[in-house]
Amino acid sequence: MIADPKTIALYKRLLTYIRPYWKAVAITIVALFITAAMTPLLPALLKDVVDESLIAKNEEAITTIPLLIILIFMVRGFAEYASKVAGEWVAHKAIQAIRSELFAKIQRLSETTHREYTEGKLLSKITYDVPQVGATLSQAWIVIIKESLIVLGLLGFLFYTTWQLTLLIIVIAPIVALVFNRASKLMRKSNKNIQASMGVLTQRLGESLKGHKEIKMYGAQSYEQARFDDASETFRKHTMKSARVAAANVPVIQLIASVSLAGVIYVASVMSANDQLTTGEFIAFITAMVMIFDPIRRLTNINATIQRGMAAAESIFDVLDHREEPNAGTQKLENKLLPIYFKNIEFAYGHERLFKDFSLTIPAGKSLALVGSSGSGKTTLVNLLTRFYDPKDGEILIGNQNIHNVETTSLRDQMAYVSQNVVLFNDTIAANIAYGKSGIPVEEIIKAAQNAHAWEFIESLPAGLDTIIGENGASLSGGQRQRIAIARAFLKNAPILILDEATSALDNESERQIQLAMEQLKQNRTVIMIAHRLTTIENADHIIVLDHGKLIEQGTHQHLLGKKGYYATLYQTGNLSE
């Protein structure tokens, strides 16, 4: 059933998640042994019922055997209850550990890996793959141990009763093994396809939920419906293929077993006719043999669960084994204003080179605006500085420290970031402003909100700072969401402030107020602005103009206008990002 080395290795790795709970595992296994031990006693008692109670009219047997049957079922029932409860507890603890480890791993994956997997595929691993693994952990090992022990116990009883007939049953084992092996391979392949198609389906759903406005505005409902239905149909086909294999597996095994049963009944009848078997032994043997088919059927059925779980485990372990965001640095970065140097940077997205021998100096405490068309490298420079990407060659220094040698956490502690695509969390306003920090005095949160000109609308809310804002701030307007994000940056009070058109969603009055606040921030921070609008950069200390990874112009706003070059052209069109 799980004979191939790869499956065994996967299942062994899964079992490491239940190892910390070995005491509960031990209780489960002992209870399973007790359950299995009780099963062969039933046909054994049936023999005495026939031979001693019904035929020999033994009075002691007539009164004792019914009591023993009750006792067997009581012990077996208690053992089954204990094994199920303890087994489920162990399984769910393991599932929780896997889910937590997977979530933590996703947080540590590099930006490149996030782009590779996509949000939908990663969501699918947690929402679909983990429950599949959970079914394997909560059912498979218990069923395998319990039913295997029952089969062994019943086989032992059959051998004890008449070994000649038992050999006839064992003959079918290689045939059954071949059917299992073929079915396992087919189900594994089908379940891998199911995992992949579920990832696509989740991705389609996520895109439609995020882009519901754009879908309606462009009348693309039919197009998106067709894409979703196509992904759903693919998922259905792969699921049905796996279901067909699983459904065919049991009848085939039962057919093979029935042929064996027919042969055994014939031979047993002949032996009984020749007084080689008592009536009780004959009935007990046939009963035990019929009873053995039930655990074999359950072992056959659990194969489908195992193959689904193994395909899901393979998918999960692929993420868990993936290379994490690099953090080889051991140094700490000083919490003070320091100049930033890009020296001879080379960087490429795959085979498409963006920067080659690129150098730039950002003086400490100054504001720098990055201007250029889409794809010019503005965002990439920020991603290199924050180490979401690493350059292929060259170095980036803050002060005299190469950021490659600095702990990633220490590096990002020195930076605050506000994007035009604001990300807020379904929590209180206070928690969103103080995001990532605990124990922040409410006075500091209020001050940050005031600096970002967000306190005016926060104060008017019934719950104030304790207002739950919904998924990504759904209960707030665009301008309010932007100001919450800016307040978060104020509270962090980092020496380096990165603004990706942070005022784009604000109305004119709010933007004017934020610009005044930004002027105050520049006195104590190094500000890097990715600029798209004129008002963002006119007062910047320095402007650099990028074009396909090349620095083509730099200077102050007035200086660049005077040159009447690329920047002046962009300025005249009123669109700094074309």
Image (spheres, rainbow, N blue to C red):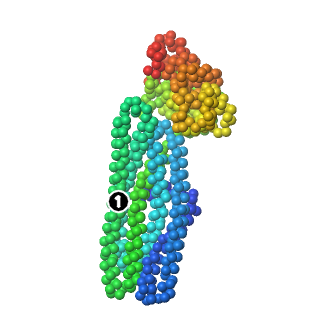
Which residue is depicted at the point 35% across and 87% down? 275
Q: Decide which of 54, 281 is in the foreground and name it.
A: 54
Q: Position of residue 1 (x, y in %)?
A: 40, 61
Helix, strand, or loop for circle 1?
helix
Asked where in the image residue 120 lies, by quadrant, the reply is top left
Q: How many marks?
A: 1
Q: Position of residue 555 (x, y in %)?
A: 53, 16
Quarter holding the C terminus?
A: top left
Which residue is depicted at the point 41% across and 56% down? 307
Q: Is residue 194 above or below residue 86?
A: above
Which residue is depicted at the point 41% across and 75% down? 288
Q: Residue furthest top?
A: 562
Q: Is residue 479 above or below residue 568?
A: below
Q: Which residue is mark 1?
A: 247
Q: Left of 290 or right of it: where is 98?
A: right
Asked where in the image residue 509 lies, by quadrant, the reply is top right
* Residue 567, visible in the rendered structure: yes
Q: Position of residue 304 (x, y in %)?
A: 40, 58
- Identity of the amino acid at label 1? Ala
Q: Position of residue 205 (x, y in %)?
A: 42, 41
Which residue is depicted at the point 45% across and 79% down? 44
